[in-house]
Every structure is written in structure tokens, then in C-alpha cells.
Image: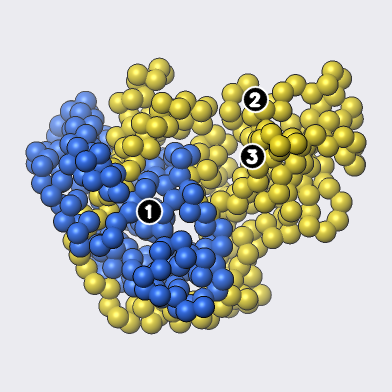
């Protein structure tokens, strides 16, 4: 599909009304980094968002405020689940079970229905997504997005360039405690797309960041030459 | 540190992140009615709307320390989450074509959430209603079916009896007219 064809979809997408084939094609196009379409869609989204205010005014019952604050108190700052880790031992069994069901639902959705490209688009637009700027010296060469719902890390590396001849870029997860973990060779994309996905990286609170090294042996247990890194 | 009702949203979010209940209460006082009205309009059910409101503000409580104001405003975050939860629920009530359930358009642009910002909910609401009033009724109908009922373009075509191309044209014209009629903080160009 050409960009002219996508221009017709900005408004319908912003209203949430695209049929699945059009939506998937458009999101894949967006994830490939087309600046005109992103800008066009951002403009349409800003207008559509204002429609929220067109809902007829309704005052919530005052008991709702009390119930909400009670639940907040019950959850408390200490028992607040950190991203990627649900504090199930603090929760009654039924609630823990429903949270587990939600987590499974989230993962199933991710695996079944979302391409890494559209997941990336979603993660980028969420102000609560933990992200790490991956730098080589002072230069930004990529970003890592921590996906709490999918329990993964998506890495986009824009400026790494090719590795030295005979070598491969290898991605490492840096735990807060312990040695870096080799999570595999990076497959560099020609355009701005997801270059690596770290499955089950562990709870967000226990991960300091990611690093990229250049290796002759991509399965090495310790990084030989770290070329870039970022912290969450 | 006690949170004043006049603190900007960013300060509120920081205080919520620090675990201050009073800050969450202030956020609720500021935006609870907006989220509730939206959820009620979607679900047409007061108790389901209350559940959405609780979910949305609990989510803010849990995720506030990850909130980065460079990627979106607080009302945009709350409204986006509320709409997404409400539409999930709406769709669970009726049979759907495969794949519809992940439509989450506000999350599809990487420049962050829409820059929804306003000083007074009442004034902002009046602006939006006035802008909607400039739309021909068939365009307004398309916007309502899509945004508030969560219908897709082909479902709207079926419901209204208009051809698909006409539905697309109405959506496009409607948003263009709204953009012309709305002020900047509300997604317009005026």
C-alpha cells in the first residue's frame, strides 16, 4: 500500500474504526517509521481524543471515591506490584488468580494478534513504558523498551552500523545483581524496526539495562567487547 | 509533602509515584468525573462505569512512577485507558469479527499520547460540544458510532446503510471540521 492510500486511514484509525486488515497494514507501515503518516495520525488522534469530553456530564457517587481510596490503602505503596512482578503473596487468592488470568490473556493477545512492529508502536506511545537509551559513547544508537504486559524487552538499534567483519552483535541483559546474560545475536533491520526481542527477561525491578557487544562467538558466556549500553 | 489542589498534573503524578494517597485523591477529584462520564457514556451502566473508574485510578497508582510527562498528559493517559477498558468490555458483550479486540488507536503513534490539556472541564466540554454542533448530523453520527460505540467502519456502514466509501468520507470530513473548530489543547488548530 502506498502512503497516499494510508492518508485516507488516519481519521478512521484515530476513531478506532478500521477493519482488521486495514489496521494491520497501517500499523505495520507506521512501525516501519514513515514520519508523514505518524504526524498525520498524531494530528487525527489529538482531535479524536477531545471527543472524550463530549460524554454527558455525570458525577460519580461519593462512595466511589471512598472505595477507591480504601483499595489504594489496602494495596499500599509497599505491596504495590513492581512492573513485571505481581506481588501475589500480598494478595488474596481469588485476586491473585484473576491477575494471573489477566496476565495470560495479555500474553496470548500479544503472541496471537500483535506483530512486534505494532507492539513497538504501542509501547512507544505509553508514558509509563520503561525505556533505556542505548548509547555508544555519547551517540544514541538505539532504544530498549520494557514490555511489562508481554514480559519482554524490545530493542530497536538504529545507528549501530555493521559489526567488524567476521563478528556479530550480541545483546546482553544486565541484571542489577550478577553477571550479564547473553540473550542472543542481534538481527539488524534495514529500517527502524524491532531488532531483538528478549523473552522472559525477569522482573523489571531486577534489571539494570541492556548492552551490545561485538563477538566472534555469538554464544559466548561473557561479553568480549561492549560497544553500546543503556540503563532503564 | 501535602499536595495542593493547584499543583500541576506533573507534581501530582510525582507525589502519587512517591506513594502519597492524598495525591491520588487529588487526581481523582480533578479527573474522576471525566473518567466516570466517559465510562458511563460507553457502557450505559453506572456500576460497570464505577468499576472502570476504579481500575483506571488503581492503574495510575501502580504505574505513576513510570509515568513520563514527555510522552503524554495525565488526562490523555486516563481517558485513553478508560476508553480502552470500556471498549474491551463493550466488545465482550457482543460477537465480533476476529482481531477486533486489539484495536487501540491512541496507542498507535510514537509521539506520545494526544496532548489533551484544559484548565476547566466545563469549559472544555462546552468547546467540544460546540465543535460537534458544527458537523452535519450524518457526520456526527459516524463519529459517535465509532468513538463511543466502538463500531468499525464496516459495522457503521451496515448500521447506517451507507456505503463504506461514504462512511470513510464522513469520518474524514468530521475530523477535519472538528480540527478547524477546536482550540489547540483540545486537538484543534484554532
Evaluate if marks 2 and 3 touch, with contact meaning CB atoms under 8 Å apart: no
Crowding near the residue tagged with mark 1, few <14, some 14–19, many ≥20 C-alpha atoms within 10 Å = many
**B179 horizontally vs B111: left or right:** left
How far apart are the alpha carbons under marks 2 and 3?
14 Å
Q: Position of residue B29 (x, y in %)?
A: 34, 73
Q: Position of residue A143 (x, y in %)?
A: 64, 39
Name the mark on residue A189: 2
For the question of whether residue B144 can be seen, the reply is yes
Chain in yellow (letter): A
- Name the mark nearer the viewer: 2 or 3: 3
Chain B, chosen colour in render: blue
Who's the residue at 21% across and 41% down the image? B190
Who's the residue at 17% across and 41% down the image? B181
How far apart are the alpha carbons under marks 1 and 2?
32 Å
**B40 horizontally vs A99: left or right:** left
> Which chain does the residue under circle 1 lie in?
B
Crowding near the residue tagged with mark 3, few <14, some 14–19, many ≥20 C-alpha atoms within 10 Å = many
- Name the mark nearer the viewer: 1 or 2: 1
Q: Is residue B165 above or below residue A103?
A: above
Amino acid at each position: 500500500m502506498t502512503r497516499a492510500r494510508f492518508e485516507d486511514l488516519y481519521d478512521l484509525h484515530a476513531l478506532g474504526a478500521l477493519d482488521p486488515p486495514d489496521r494491520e497494514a497501517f500499523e505495520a507501515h507506521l512501525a516501519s517509521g514513515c514520519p508523514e503518516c505518524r504526524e498525520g495520525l498524531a494530528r487525527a488522534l489529538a482531535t479524536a481524543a477531545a471527543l472524550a469530553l463530549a460524554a454527558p456530564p455525570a458525577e460519580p457517587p461519593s462512595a466511589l471515591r471512598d472505595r477507591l481510596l480504601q483499595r489504594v490503602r489496602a494495596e499500599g505503596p509497599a505491596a504495590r506490584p513492581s512492573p513485571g512482578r505481581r506481588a501475589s503473596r500480598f494478595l488474596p487468592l481469588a485476586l491473585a488468580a484473576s491477575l494471573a488470568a489477566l496476565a495470560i490473556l495479555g500474553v496470548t493477545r500479544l503472541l496471537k494478534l500483535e506483530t512486534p512492529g505494532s507492539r513497538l508502536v504501542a509501547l512507544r506511545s505509553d508514558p509509563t513504558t520503561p525505556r533505556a537509551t542505548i548509547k555508544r559513547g555519547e551517540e544514541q544508537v538505539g532504544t530498549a523498551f520494557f514490555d511489562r504486559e508481554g514480559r519482554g524487552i524490545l530493542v530497536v538499534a538504529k545507528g549501530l552500523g555493521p559489526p567488524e567483519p567476521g563478528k556479530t552483535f550480541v545483546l546482553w541483559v544486565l541484571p542489577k545483581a550478577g553477571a550479564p546474560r547473553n540473550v542472543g545475536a542481534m538481527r539488524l533491520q534495514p529500517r527502524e524496526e524491532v531488532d531483538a526481542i528478549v523473552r522472559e527477561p525477569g522482573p523489571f525491578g531486577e534489571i539494570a539495562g541492556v548492552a551490545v557487544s561485538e563477538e566472534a562467538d555469538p554464544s559466548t558466556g561473557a561479553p568480549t567487547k561492549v560497544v553500546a549500553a543503556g540503563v532503564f | 509533602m501535602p499536595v495542593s489542589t493547584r499543583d500541576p498534573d506533573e507534581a501530582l503524578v510525582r507525589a502519587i509515584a512517591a506513594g502519597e494517597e492524598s495525591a491520588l485523591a487529588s487526581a481523582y477529584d480533578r479527573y474522576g468525573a471525566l473518567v466516570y462520564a466517559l465510562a458511563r457514556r460507553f457502557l450505559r451502566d453506572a456500576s460497570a462505569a464505577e468499576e472502570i473508574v476504579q481500575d483506571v485510578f488503581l492503574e495510575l497508582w501502580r504505574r505513576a512512577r513510570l509515568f513520563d510527562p514527555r510522552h503524554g498528559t495525565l488526562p490523555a493517559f486516563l481517558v485513553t485507558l478508560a476508553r480502552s477498558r470500556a471498549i474491551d468490555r463493550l466488545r465482550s458483550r457482543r460477537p465480533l469479527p476476529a482481531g477486533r479486540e486489539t484495536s487501540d488507536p491512541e496507542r498507535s503513534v510514537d509521539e506520545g499520547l494526544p496532548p489533551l490539556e484544559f484548565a476547566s472541564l466545563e469549559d472544555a466540554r462546552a468547546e467540544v460540544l460546540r465543535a460537534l454542533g458544527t458537523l452535519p448530523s450524518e457526520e456526527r453520527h459516524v463519529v459517535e458510532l465509532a468513538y463511543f460505540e466502538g463500531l468499525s467502519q464496516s459495522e457503521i456502514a451496515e448500521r447506517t446503510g451507507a456505503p463504506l466509501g461514504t462512511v470513510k468520507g464522513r469520518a474524514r470530513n468530521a475530523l477535519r471540521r472538528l480540527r478547524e473548530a477546536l482550540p489547540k489543547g483540545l486537538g484543534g488548530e484554532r
